[in-house]
Image (cartoon, coloured by chain):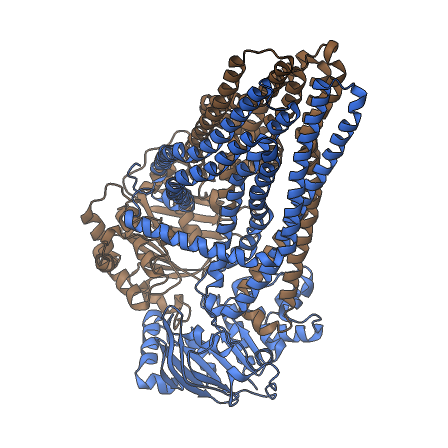
Chain colours: A brown, B blue
Amino acid sequence: MRDFLRLLRLMRPQAGWMALSVLLAATATLASIALMAISGWFVTAMALAGAAGVTMNYFTPSAYIRACALLRTGGRYAERIVGHEATLRFVASLRPWLFARMEAGAPATLQGLASGDLLSRLRGDIDRLETAFLRVLSPFAVALLALGPCLAVLAAHDGAMAIVTGLIILTGALIIPIILHAGSAASARRLARGSARLNALLVEEVQGLQELAVYDGARLHRARLLAASDALTADEQRLSQASSLATAPLLAAPHLALLGVLILGLPRLGNGGIAPAELPMLALLALATFDAVVAIPLAIQTIPTLLSSARRVFEVADTPAPAPEPAVPRAIPRSGALRLQGVGLTYPGASTPSLAGLDLDLVPGRRIAVVGPSGSGKSSIASLAMRFVPPSEGTIAFADVPYPALRGADIRDRLALMSQADHLFSGSIAENLRIADPRAGHASLCEACRIAQILDFIEAQPKGFDTEVGAHGTRLSGGEARRIALARALLARRPILILDEPTEGLDLATEAALLDALLDARPDLTLLLLTHRPARLERMDEIIRLEQGRVVARGGPAELARLLPPPALTT
Amino acid sequence: MASDTLLTTEAAPPDETEMAGAQEARQRKSRAARLLAGWRPLARRELAAAMVAGALGGAVIVAQAWVVASILDAALFRGAPPEALTGGLLALAGLLVLRAVAAYGAERFGFAAAMKVVPALRRAMLERLDRIGPLGLSGTPSGEIVAALADGVRGTEPFFSRYIPATSQAVVLPLGILIVVAPLDWVSALAFLVTAPLIPLFMALIGMGAEQRNQRQWRRLQRMSGHFLDAIQGIATLKAFNAGPRMVGEVAEAADGYRRDTMAVLRIAFLSSLTLEFFATVSIALVALMIGLRLMWGEMGYQHGLFVLLLAPEFYLPLRAMGTAYHARMESLGAAERLAALEDMPDMAESGAGVGAPPLPAGPVAIRFEDVRLDFADGRRALDGVSFTIPAGETWAVVGASGAGKSSLFALLMGFARPTGGRILVNGAPLAALDLAAFRAGLAYVPQRPTLFAADAAANIALGEAAPDAARVVQAARQAAIHARLEALPQGYATPLGEGGHALSGGEAHRVGLARAFYRDAPLVLLDEPTAHLDAGTEAAVQQAIAGLKPGRTLLVIAHRLASLAHADRILVLERGRVVEIGTEAALRAAGGTFAALVRSALAEGETPA
């Protein structure tokens, strides 16, 4: 319920459009109902007049009929336009809101979203919130507005008719769908479990295709997979059977109401208080009133999924920033040393620390390399330095100002990071580079790309810097993507550069050339190089070897042989 | 739209690529439609039953209108007393029940049709995977394949459960009503007859333009959604560059620009439903007016008049329902596109023509490649003119830069790909003529990152065996230097591994893979060494385990490390799909060729000799 109210609050700026849309929809619905009822009355009255041999004024009712027809058609069209306008306006306000919230909590907000699976779920959740008005709110509001006048007209002629019709509508459109939904919740859960199981087996089948072909000659895994698929089908059949068993009677509900009106009305014909032409009108009115509630069962079905979508989206939006911003930030010096003292990091829920007792003194102009296998804690150092996470122990300071006293954005103004997970956005190379500096001119782009050894490649492309990189940079090779990410970090022109596995995906020659170019072009660069590859370590001032979060060796370039693991032939 | 730097919703393709894209999209759609239509006969009976139930529902609607009209006619114009109408009212109640039954039947049979197709489709797609083979699939992310097999297959459901039944209803019901109404009231029938075809016609006329705009808009929406998610995925990168606030503005601007564009399109797109509503509504109003006038003039009986009036909305209802049915079709087509993509991949796997051929004799295996070539369907050449002979019982290391053809070589040896030229001999017999299953039963394969299945540790080692031999499992784990680790798990060898189970590190997972090879005790072992740097202890354990595999086996190792070469009797060096060198480590180092260069750069990099 809280999530629902919060969703409503988010929609408030669009309340005017939404109200207009509901009003138009209710008008169109009422016009449609009136069309049927008036037609029923008109036809009967005309027949009665004909039978009595008198003429009647048919201009007025036929004008009403024409008016209703036009109102229904035009109303529907206007309602669709206004409703979509409201929805799209909501989209345009929801997305920046969500993005800003996620950015504040990043990268913690992304932790759970690393897999494409969860990301696509978030996408579905956002879609569902965005259509909440059209699919859920609007049907209920329209039904409430339109039912009143219909039932009032019935009640004006016969209270019992209104009660019977109201009860049938209440049962058919509200109570049965709710019961049905509550009853099917258990089966739906089983269905969700079944399809999760099928999915897991499919993932294994596809990822382990080769091993299964070699080892699983009897195809036991395939048999399990097919059995899970068949079980899921059987469950779906059962669920659908239950739901059609419950929904089929609803189709008969409008005629049930008509039958009720006839049973009540027929004895009152003549001197009973109901004029002959009024009975067909009331019967058709009862029948057509169901037009006002056709969308309700679907809306009821959508509510639980909508709410869980809202919950998930709000959860992501509410992920707190791991490192809180200071209330009164201190000004950050232009330059200075990045100093880590006794720094440790244990991620929440982890039993062992990712990093422990690290001392690091990156004074301006110094180049430090941290080497170690993947998972040894190198990337944690980058996260700590960028203040994406606060250390669990020890202190970090820039130019002797402790991190907690500084604004995160100010810290990131002094540090440039090329991370292992650097993202290339779908767009051109230039657009990706300018993320680091939106005002960078062509010359700066060229300069950064030259150092990153990617300028030749870019200039060889027909569209040069306007070459599209594709989603996640898929139109580039891994090495090209890394070099563009490096150029981007260089373009930022921060005093300190942190490179996390910058040469992954490059061949050995390119790797060495790249580091040489970087060190030659920026001889006074303050550099923190995190790597598992040993290229050009001799040009560093200090090498720190990390294993399982702990420093196992450190020393100068003269001691490299002692500091490094045995070399690799290929990667 | 605004000119964004990050969210280039508009900066994308100029018109001709957009047109080409539309053309391509149409082709994909029609391919998907053919795929769906191909499965229709399988559910022929269920679909026919759904159609009959739908037609029965239509008949009940007509009957209901008739009974209501006769009751009111009797009460209002024939002065029948209420008691005389009881029969009619009872008939109406009976029809209500029949209506519910028909609706239930139509829905059940429609869904049953879909549920007949879905599992069969999934089976067929899994068989496709076998024929395409791991190498043919290697270019497609496994997530995409899984999505096709799960959601793609499931997504075809609405086509069979809703679209096909709705299309037949849209033809049968209006036609039925027309046939009933025509003899009673030719004027109204004429109104129906004239307006009914106008509806699809006008919808099509407006639709033709709107469809194109719609598709363009749809692509734009997907692009915008894609960009939004792209921005979310890159949120850490944005934050690192303090570019987040800028992006918030751009997200807002893009969404607002999208709103303005979309509304311009929707105003026209909704015209098609406006047309539909307009004709249906005006026709109902017209029919009512004309019936009224003829009733007053005494040219028509009340019963017939009311009957036709009641049927008028029902005449247009199935046509209007086509809108949602069309949506169901689009949904299924989108799903089927994924399946079509899978279905259209070329078969690469060795078909194993020799089912029932005698199995290999026990003992080490000799391998011979004779001028083997492997081309991908898109023309890329993975291997070319590869010839070599591995005598039984030798250990060979395969060395080469990434993309040199090492994985292709392994894929060929396991029958995951058929050579496009030359042949492969196993103990002198062509691989293509062997019983593949029997051949693979004498084979062990350890990939870089072995897949751990959601089963206990013992079952993971004895993969493919319904009843693992506990003693042999432990023995194999010992040989692979993973016994101590597995024994220490919360439930020992009964601890579930894989997704949702106990997580193992990459090095540990690799040793479970090695244990698989020991357990199988196969005479031929193919091993892809892990590339990721393992910590020193793991590294030593893995090397020792590999050495333990040598005796009595033919062993092929894709080697990534100098240290691993020590095990090898010979080294085979691949470069761009060709064998450039074969020889002992010492000989190759002395030769000064590709291998020597690889070693040199590895040493230059590491500074420490192996």
Residue B291, visible in the rendered structure: yes
Classify A487 as above or below B243: below
Task: Where is residue B158? Give x, y as percent.
Answer: 57, 47
Front in this rendered view, residue B573 or B80? B80
Q: Tell me which residue sits at (56%, 26%) in the image.
A: A5
Q: Position of residue B309 (x, y in %)?
A: 60, 27
Query: Of B571 and A251, which appears nearest the observer?
Result: A251
Quadrant location of the N terminus of chain B in the rendered image: top left
Specify the quadrant that holds the C terminus of chain B.
bottom left
Residue A342 against residue A216 in the figure, above or below? above
Q: Quadrant of residue A217?
A: bottom right
Return the x and y of residue B404 as percentages of the image width and height. 37, 74
How many dots with numbers?
0
In the displayed structure, does residue A245 sit left or right of residue A454? right
Task: Choose top left, top right, bottom left or bottom right for residue B45.
Answer: bottom right
Q: Image point 64% across, 61% down: which residue?
A: A226
Q: Is residue B155 left or right of residue B69?
A: left
